[in-house]
Image (cartoon, rainbow, N blue to C red):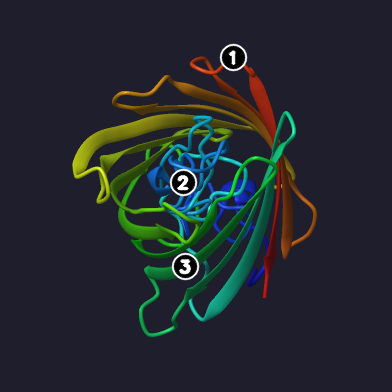
Amino acid sequence: MAGCPTPSATDARFSRSRSTASSRWTRTSKLRAAARKRATLPARRPLRWSLALAAAGTAGWPVAGLANGAFLIDDALVTPAGRAQVEGLILFSGRERLVVLTPAFTPAATPLWEFTATLERGFGESAARVVGLEVKRGAGEDPPAPGEVQLGAGLQHGVNLARDGGSETTLLGLMSVGAHERVRLHANAGLIRDWDARRTVPTGGLRLAFDVRPDTLSLQGEVLLTQGQAPVWQLGVRHQLSQQATLDLAYSRNRGEERGGGMVIAAALAL
């Protein structure tokens, strides 16, 4: 990422394993609805996973489609203008595995517009092979100061290439609030369109980020709600390894699934 990390840089897009492309836009995201027919793991969160929210798979586990690292609720931040970022994520749930790769880029000519591609591959019983594109209008690369409110929006479309797959589009409104020098609140709300099922459902969620060690380590908890699905809860940590790299580790819990929880490991590298 460009320059020295700003206060609370652990929540910045470059530091994120983002909080688009998809999302987890990106990032959250749940696994895309497109994977519902074949995958036992959800295909996601695009807007980075990307919310960014992706839809849930048959196992109901969301992953980010917007670049949000291991987290589902997007933070309204974008990659620094003229720079790129690559994010990778692995979700473990029982014998199932989901691998997600999310490169993102913000053109210098449009410093608040981020463009992200999402590639997802399921292993085990899951046959999900999802490709997605996302565009996000963020608030910049710096997290909100205390008392500041940041707004953004994202649009993501994903297609499941596996047999009997489908496609899904997610439209999200993004908001981040600086509640304290060490605390930020992120909120997402929007709609998910499942083109195969011909239905549109509302989705949204909240994420709370607390800096245990400013610019280095943050504790994050979130909940994702989608009509017709059980709530998804996540608790995790984000560690800024350097100015260019972050590492996320999170535990997911879908109360509607008998299998219980899943572990998510995500890393982001600024180029």
The N terminus appears in which quarter of the rendering? bottom right
**Residue 191 placement: quadrant:** top left
Q: Nearer the viewer, mark 3 or mark 1?
A: 1
Residue 157: x and y, percent?
Answer: 35, 60
Residue wearing tag 3: 116
Helix, strand or loop status at disc 3: strand
Residue wearing tag 1: 258
Earlier along the polypeptide chain: callout 2 or callout 3?
A: 2
Residue found 58% across the figure and 75% down from its top: 84
Q: Residue furthest right?
A: 241
Q: Determine contact: label 2, label 1, CB under 8 Å.
A: no
Q: Residue furthest front?
A: 163
**Residue 202 seen in this snapshot:** yes
Q: Nearer the viewer, mark 2 or mark 3?
A: 2
Earlier along the polypeptide chain: callout 2 or callout 1?
A: 2
Task: Name the amino acid type tagged 3.
Answer: Thr
